[in-house]
Structures are given as C-alpha cells and as structure tokens.
Image (cartoon, helix red, strand yellow):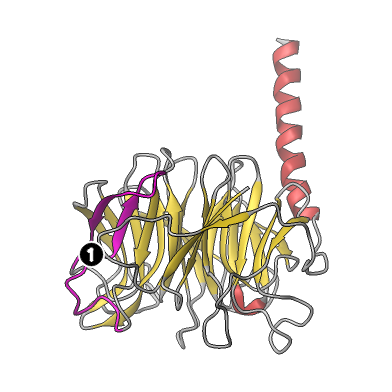
C-alpha cells in the first residue's frame, strides 16, 4: 500500500512539474537565424482540381492530410466546389466533400474517431459562423452555431477559426477573428456538440485574446492558442488556467504540437511595423522549454501582397504541411 501511495505521489509531482514548467517558461527574443534542416518538396499533391485559397490543414492518425480551402476568390457560399480534401501520404486525393455547406474556410481538425470538424469563420449568403462535423465519408453529423449569424451566446460563434481535441474527445474551438463583437475566447464542446464551458476574454492582458487564429493541444492536454495580433502564443491547461505567453515564435497564424512535444508555428505577418525584430517564416521548437530550434524562411514567391503560409500541421514522420492562402498552395517540407 505504501508503495502504491509513493507511486501516486510521484505521478502527481511529475504532472505538477510539467504544468509548472509550462507556466515558468518566459518569452525569448524572436529567432530568425536558427538552423533549417528541412527541404521543400514541389508538385507533390495530385488532386482533381487546384487548391483554392487555403490556410486550414491537419493530419489524421493514418498520416492522411486534410485540406480545407475557400473554393475560389469569392469563397464557397455560391460555389458548387467541395472544399474539404483528404490526401494520402503518397499525395493522391482520397476524398473531396463539403459542397454547399460553407462561406469561407478557416480551421480543420480530425478527432480520434476519424471525424472531420471544419470551422467557417465568415458570414455570407446565409452560411458561415459555424463548425460542422463530418463523418470520414463526408456525411454531416452535426452543426454548431447559427448559420450566417455571429453572436455572443454559447449557441453562436463570433468568427470561429480553429479546432483541436482533448484526450477525452472533447473539442476545443476558438473564436474571435477580428470582429467588432469583441468576443474572443476558447470553447469546449463534447463530441456530440454539447457546450461545456468557455474561457479567456477579448483583450491584451495576461490570458486574454485579441485574435485567436489557430489552436493546438499537446499530450498533457495543454492548449496553445495563436493570438496573432498580440504577437504571442497563449498556453492554458485544460480547465482554462493561464500558464504562459510566448512571443519567441513570432506573429503566429498557425500552430501545431506533435506527439513528441515539438511545436510548429507559421508566422505569415511579422514585419517591423507590427512585430519589430521578427521575420516571417516557420519556427519549430519544444513545448518543454519554449525555445526555438529551427527556422524555415518563407518560400519563393512571397511579396508584400502574397504572404507565406498561415496554416500548419505535421505527420508522424515529421513532414510539415503549410497552407498558403494567397499562393493557393500547400507547401510540403521534409527533413
């Protein structure tokens, strides 16, 4: 019995130590010159049509890539195109669905059952402001939010931008993409769509959010929110307790944490006016110490009007997929 108590005590101390470590990590200077062990792969995807504007990508348990694009320059609300793609590790498209459901794509996540959750952040033609859950074959399973209607209630979204999942299967949904409603927060729903709780509020203080643009969850159920216009990543525990705020990863548009506690951040906006000392690009580090280990410079073709990728995800082999809105491409990087 004494041994069992000792084991439990050690486990609790280890858990507390991990939380304390995340809380203790301070921001470091933005890193623009770390090594780059990655090489960009060209012409890797084989799809039935070219990608439209996209910043939403994720991978599932089988290393299939899921891409959620905006159909065309005018969005999806009047398009007959299907904006959700499933692409195998070999680059070949396996599925394409979602026609007629969306206004404009922003975030995508795949839960442990293989279901696809897609966040539609705009409102147009009676569509948008929803998160829609699909079965892997494209069947609509549930819709959260009121179509085309932003709002302050728990049954409404104010521009939802990202979806991730806790180990319990509960969905973590962020909202607040620059709207005048000033509702920027993190929402937790069951897998069946029941609202459980929310945390954070609109603002610039500790734990607050100004423009939550992407979200990730690590193996300890810590939640990482890319608060883009505040030039930081906010870290919370699963209950919503604020743990840390990191600025060393730049002005984050996209964030992903893999099973090895590596964090990948896409910075598509840093410049001297809005984030002095930081350059655009992809930064890779560890959630254990918050330090940036690698830096990938923007790909060729970036201009003042064509920024680098915003969305980011990583498969089990460490292959990075980065989605660029204006470029209408998903860049692939391998070590």
Q: Nearer the viewer, residue 273 or 144?
A: 273
Give the answer, above or below, for where 323 lies relative to 325: above
Point out residue 285 in the picture as x, y percentages from the top left corner. 71, 53
Q: Nearer the viewer, residue 142 or 271?
A: 271
Question: Which secondary structure lies at badge 1?
Answer: loop
Q: What residue span does the magenta drawing correspond to?
A: 74-99
Magenta: main secondary structure equals loop
Point out residue 178 in the picture as x, y percentages from the top left corner. 50, 83
Q: Residue at x 38, y 67 (%)?
A: 154
Q: Quick check: 58 left or right of 19? A: left
Is residue 172 visible to us here? no
Give the answer, above or below, for where 191 lies relative to 107: above
Question: Does the magenta segment cover residue 259?
Answer: no
Rendering quarter of residue 81: bottom left
Is residue 128 visible to us here? yes
Tell me if mark 1 has few (under 14), some (14-19) or many (20+) residues whose alpha carbon lies within 10 angstroms of its own: some
Give the answer, above or below, for where 93 lies relative to 98: above
Point out residue 141 in the picture as x, y percentages from the top left corner. 22, 52
Q: Residue at x 66, y 48 (%)?
A: 262
Point out residue 177 in the picture as x, y percentages from the top left corner. 48, 78
Residue to which mark 1 is pinned: 82
Q: Residue at x 18, y 69 (%)?
A: 100
């Amino acid at each position: 019995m004494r041994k069992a108590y000792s084991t439990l005590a050690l486990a609790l101390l280890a858990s507390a130590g991990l939380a304390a470590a995340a809380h203790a990590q301070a921001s470091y200077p933005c890193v623009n010159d770390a090594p780059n062990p990655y090489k960009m792969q060209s012409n890797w995807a084989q799809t039935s049509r070219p990608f439209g504007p996209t910043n939403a990508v994720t991978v599932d348990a089988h290393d299939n890539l899921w891409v959620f694009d905006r159909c065309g320059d005018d969005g999806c609300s009047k398009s007959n195109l299907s904006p959700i793609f499933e692409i195998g590790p070999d680059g070949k498209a396996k599925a394409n669905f979602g026609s007629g459901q969306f206004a404009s794509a922003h975030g995508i996540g795949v839960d442990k059952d293989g279901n696809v959750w897609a966040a539609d952040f705009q409102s147009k033609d009676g569509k948008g402001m929803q998160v829609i859950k699909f079965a892997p074959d494209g069947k609509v399973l549930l819709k959260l939010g009121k179509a085309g209607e932003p709002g302050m209630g728990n049954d409404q979204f104010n521009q939802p931008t990202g979806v991730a999942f806790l180990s319990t299967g509960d969905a973590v949904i962020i909202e607040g993409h620059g709207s005048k409603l000033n509702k920027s927060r993190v929402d937790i729903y069951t897998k069946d769509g029941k609202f459980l709780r929310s945390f954070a509020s609109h603002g610039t203080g500790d734990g607050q959010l100004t423009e939550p643009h992407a979200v990730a969850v690590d193996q300890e159920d810590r939640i990482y929110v890319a608060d883009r216009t505040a030039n930081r990543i906010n870290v919370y525990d699963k209950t919503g307790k604020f743990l840390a705020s990191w600025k060393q990863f730049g002005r984050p548009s996209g964030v992903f944490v893999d099973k090895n506690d590596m964090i990948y951040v896409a910075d598509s906006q840093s410049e001297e006016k809005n984030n002095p000392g930081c350059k655009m690009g992809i930064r890779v580090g560890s959630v254990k110490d918050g330090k940036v280990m690698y830096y990938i410079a923007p790909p060729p073709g970036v201009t003042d009007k064509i920024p680098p990728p915003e969305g980011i995800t990583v498969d089990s082999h460490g292959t990075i997929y980065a989605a660029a809105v204006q470029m209408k491409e998903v860049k692939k990087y391998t070590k």
